[in-house]
Amino acid sequence: MQNDEIPPLSGWSEAELDQAFAAVALEVEDSAAALRSPEQFRLQWLGRKQGRLKAISDSWLKSAPADARKAIGQRFNTLKAEIERRLELADSASPHDALDAEAVDITLPGTQRKLGAEHPLIRTWNEIVSVFQRMGYSVGAGPEVETDYYNFESLNFPPGHPARDTQDTLVIAGQERKPLRDRLLMRTHTSPVQIRTMEQQPPPVRIVIPGKVHRNDAADATHYPIFHQVEGLCVDANITFGDLKGTLDFAMKAFFGSSVRTRFFPSFFPFTEPSADVQISCPFCGGSGCRKCKQSGWIELLGCGMVDPAVFGLVQGKQPGYDPKKVSGFAFGMGIDRIAMMKYGIGDIGLLYSGDLRFLEQFV
Amino acid sequence: MKILSNWIREYVPGITASDRVLADDLTLRGIAVEGVFDLGAHGSVFEMDITTNRVDAMNHYGIAREAATIYGLELKPLKASLPTARPGARAFSVLIEEPKLCGRFTARVLRDVKIAPSSGVVAERFRLLEQKPIYNAVDASNYVLLGMGQPTHAFDLDKIEGGIVVRRARKGEKLRTLDGVERVLDADDLVVADEKKPLGIAGVMGGWDTMIAPETKNVLVEAAWFDPATVRRSSKRHLLHTDASHRFERGTDFNAPPVASALVSRIILEAGDKKENEAGAFIDGELVDVVIPEAIARTANRGAISFIMGEVRRMLGPTEDAEGITSAAAEGILTGLGCGLATNGPEQWSVTLPSWRLDLEREIDLVEEIARVYGYNRFRNTLPAFKGTVVELPWAEKEAAVRRTLLALGWNEAVLSSFCGAEDAARFAREPRSAVAIGNPLSEEAGMLRPSLLPGVLDMLALNISRDVEGAALFEMGTVFSGGPERVDERPSVAIGATGSAFVKDEVGFYDLKGAVEKLLDKFAARSVYFDRFPAASGLMPAWLHPGRGARAVLDGATMGWFGQLHPAEAERRKLKQTVWIGELWLDRLYKQALRQPVVEELSRYQPVRRDFSVTLPDGVLYAKVAAALEGLAIPELRSFESKEVLRDPKGKLVPAGHYSLLLRVVFQSHERTLREEEVQGWSQQVIAALEAEGGKLRG
């Protein structure tokens, strides 16, 4: 659009002048759009020495006959007013240089208002519980100090049974004089709440029970005297092993993503029969093998099984509805700690219970 | 436990699957192979993890039986042909004094045996299994245990005085066991004894004095069935967990002892190079086999149970395979595992149970066996229909509100141990002497159930200080315990703890803590909330709290908890050099209140008018008094007031000594009209008068 040449006037008639001035006006408009700053625009058109407007007017007025000069002069005044109007507009609307001068260093970090960090266990706890809530499970809770009866006997761990060895138990002091079933201990699993719930409520039942449990285990990277479990229980007429499989398969997909697969292995728990251990395909590598799944492609995550009729039998005294001939059910359990450790890559369970801020603050 | 694949194949010659496939097939049936290690020409070693209920599968033959069932192959019977016994002068005497505790006892006398290192297949398999060989007579016993799971014991016969008596130990009786430890026996221990002395703790470990030695000539081979609970109690009492006790306490096969005895005897008899003209070892007399009839009924000859296919379908559901589990398939599985089936009707049987599977007792046990061998992963995944409602725990919403509030205010959540030391328990308990002790604590510092969350919070602050953090603000929500051996009460609680520049650059102070407590309490509906403190001398402040910088929070007349600076003496005891602020709120009490429901106040369309009053007040006039005075004015248009600044100057330059300066902002606003200047003037005069009545002086 820069055109230093001065267009010659083809004549001095009104029409010819209008046409010539229209061309210049167009040039003004184009250069206003093209030039970056109002100052450049002003210099180009109104500059005292090199201003184009002056050059054109000098050239045209000089060559014009005297009777045409007035008409030309008027038109130049109009044009100049238009240029000044544009300049004024630009000055008020977009003081680019001035705002740029106020620029801040946007690469400096933002103001860090401290948020509290949610504990990874609580976070995982809530995520698991919400999956089952969406499947119709209510939340159950029970005491951390239990009786031997609820922690063991009612779950088909008879006194002296070797299966009790797998759950080293912390006991409350001064229980020696009580009958075994009434002795108080730190619950070793949240399963007692299954029994307490059934004793209080006839079937059908669907509950999920998150909670803290305790074992007489020395601490190492994967064991701690304290850990957390989520257990679930579903009892109704015609609940099958297939329902157990389908429920856990669905829950694992909801929790880890729809591409996760499950597989079931026979196992043993006194309170379920048949019992199973459940593995999920590794959600990190998709099953091809990685560090998290120890290259196996699978991770063992759950224990579960069909509620043993003996357990129903013990509950029947208080709730006759749990007739093992008429109802069936399944129970499952998983370690919140283990899942959290796996999910967040935590190598030492002790970190979860350390209160070490350098660890906790990573979960903000 | 380690298993040799080739040993399995010896019992089930028909297996065509590779070792790896065999391992996978076993694992899918609950006989878990954790690792497979290649031994080249010798096959593989399987590292097994057998569940506690499957004692029958804790040996090669038991696992071979599983493999045979899975593949529908034949399992070779176990038998040992022995040379004919020389007729003994008289049968070896065996007396079972405790027929309830020992159901069967077999004894066989071998004479002129050669005690030597094991050779041949025994030595080779021990090597492959990394089992330490001792002498042939001892190794024979271990070999049979590995092979078929029946524990046996070989005694030096010449050290036995008279016959065998299976009896209870006499209280205080002593026995030196094979591990060299002299043990004092209990009347509850069952012992295998001779006429004079105990020879071993039944089912647990033999005695030192009668053990096989290089010079042993004559051997007595014991194979028996002991009551599982008795063996278990002895094993626990003497802290002696042996391969034998592990099996006996889970219930061994009642029919196994004669077979095991023959297998062991055969290995012992075969051992040693026979020199020419040497007579060689021989069996002296027939096997002595004492059987208690009641024990047979409880084990080998248990009554048949009824089994219906319908139960399989009701419990297990549909399979992937359209045909499902057929009667023939179920029959095949149960028969393979050793059950005897007699048809009772269409798809129903009367089933006798194998003597080696004491874990099978009921119909459901058979259902499990069928599911297990058929394959869990062949059942279709289904979802049960649901009718009902989902119920939250009554306190769930309140708990979430407390947690959300603290997180939003910048406090980090921690989860800590449920235990604390006795001293902390005494110092921090809500009620004196109410802490509960653990009978078998992991350590002294974890000897009590925590009566308060504060010791944990303090430990955690100390840890973070030692890690050199600039500031820390932490909270824990958890259970606190009180009571005694009879009854333990559990209550929810929340504790907060902060130190250093936890929130902003400034050091945390009392008002940071109070602000958090106020925000928490504000989540709950209340008619009144106030804070108070008591003089140190009153004894009403908790011992852990700085009496001048601590406060009690009271909501609707009930104490909700205490907070403030840790008492300097307690800080000293814990070697905490920097100031630490802590508090605990008793959530059992707070949860009795409903959550506060926001109720919207009508917004005024008229401008508020703010007036600031700068006033000097004597130190004795607390802010609460000032606030009460302003509230006492009862000016409807006085919408709110707040303290904008409190200034104290110990040097008395900015504020006279014994006084403080308060900048009070008062806001007037009406819902009906724009306030006139004269009105505001008038109210301001009232405010000034009220402040002056409390001893305040308006600053210039």
Image: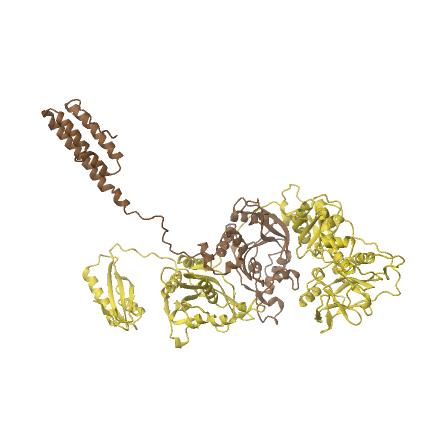
Chain colours: A brown, B yellow
The C terminus of chain B lies in quadrant: bottom left
The reply, left or right, for residue A165 in relation to residue A224 is: right
The reply, left or right, for residue A252 in relation to residue B223 is: left
The reply, left or right, for residue B520 in relation to residue B37 is: left
Q: Quadrant of residue B191?
A: bottom right
| Residue B200 visible in rendering | yes
* Residue placed furthest toward the left: A66
Task: Tell me residue B346's x, y (percent).
Answer: 72, 46
Task: Tell me residue B503's x, y (percent).
Answer: 38, 59
Q: Quadrant of residue B297?
A: bottom right
The N terminus of chain B lies in quadrant: bottom right
Task: Tell me residue B312's x, y (percent).
Answer: 66, 49
| Residue B254 visible in rendering | no
Foreground residue among B219 and B399: B219
Residue at left offset 18%, top offset 35%: A46
* Residue placed furthest toward the bottom: B537
Task: Tell me residue B328's x, y (percent).
Answer: 72, 44
Foreground residue among A285 and B644: A285
Foreground residue among A62 and A335: A62
Q: How many marks?
A: 0
